[in-house]
Amino acid sequence: KTFKDLGNQRDMVVAQDQLAYLYRLRSNYEQAEQLYSESLMTAIHLGDRQLIATIQGQLADLYLLRGDYEKAERLYHASLKIVEELGDQRDVAVAQSNLARLLQLRRDYKQAERLYRASLKTAEKLGDRRGTAVKQSQLAYLYRLRGDYEQAEQLFRASLKTAEELGDRREVAVTQGQLAYLYHLRGDYEKAEQLFRASLKSNEELGDRREVAVTQHNFAMMRATQGRIEEALALLTLSRDTFHELGLEKDVAKDEEMIRKVRERLAAGSLKFEF
């Protein structure tokens, strides 16, 4: 409001962008989208290409969270094109990893790995420790999806160590949840449970409702694998209800499908699952 009163449009856009990011972290996606869209229009009016690229990437992140991959892809490509032309290697690395996440969701693992590796190499070259930790975790997640658990664990642990050293609680919580799911897949349920609980606690304290729901869903998968069906159903119900409140209907559908499958197995007398 102060920047708007003073007529400083660029500072107003930056402030709006920061507020939108806060709303996104709090899972208030409608207000976040409104602010990002307003900021983008003003940045375009100002002709500030770096600011345009930054907001495009953040708005694309929001669309990715909401499952609108077409809008996300269009904005990611536009953002990457601008930062490549401007020559800012740090911004290029961020844009590459963002686009890689989308390619990963579309199961184009080869191209996703290429972009993740390029992004990680740049972050390391620039001495960007936080960026390196984030990109290690992203690449580890890709390896986990491909079944390369050894490389995934190595990268998750390196990422977690750096995030802890930097005091980045949000990145620590996310990586703990991912490493927990990896241990679940490897059958190390004790380590997995410790990390799931730590991740849940941190995400709850941070107020990140989406990450709480994601962790509850993953924790439920482990409980189902262990044959602890009632606990699995309780966690899936909590996860589904939170996703519904956040308007993330694709995630709601996944939880409802899993609840249905768990109940079918329970009715048939089968108490264990494999994922």
Image: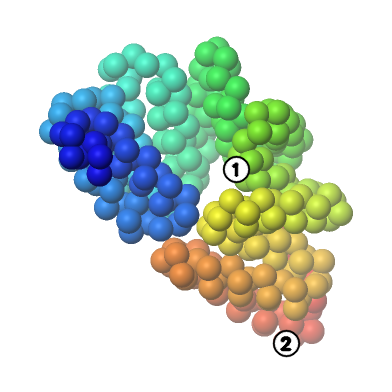
With respect to residue 191, does 140 lie above or below? above
Q: Amino acid at mark 1?
A: Arg
**What residue appears at the point 55 percent right and 71 percent down from the top-left corner?**
240
Front residue (pair 191, 182): 191
With respect to residue 124, does 33 lie above or below? below
Residue 187 picture location, percent across and down = 83, 53
Image quadrant where one finds the N terminus: top left
Q: Quadrant of residue 41?
A: top left
Kindly identify which residue carries mark 2: 267
Q: Secondary structure at mark 1?
A: helix
Front residue (pair 14, 95): 14
How many numbered discs sit on the rendered protein? 2
Few, some or many residues within 10 Å of mark 2 (<14, 14–19, 20+) = few
Q: Of the numbered discs in the image, which one, if any, rests on residue 35?
A: none
Kindly identify which residue carries mark 1: 170
Coloring scheme used = rainbow
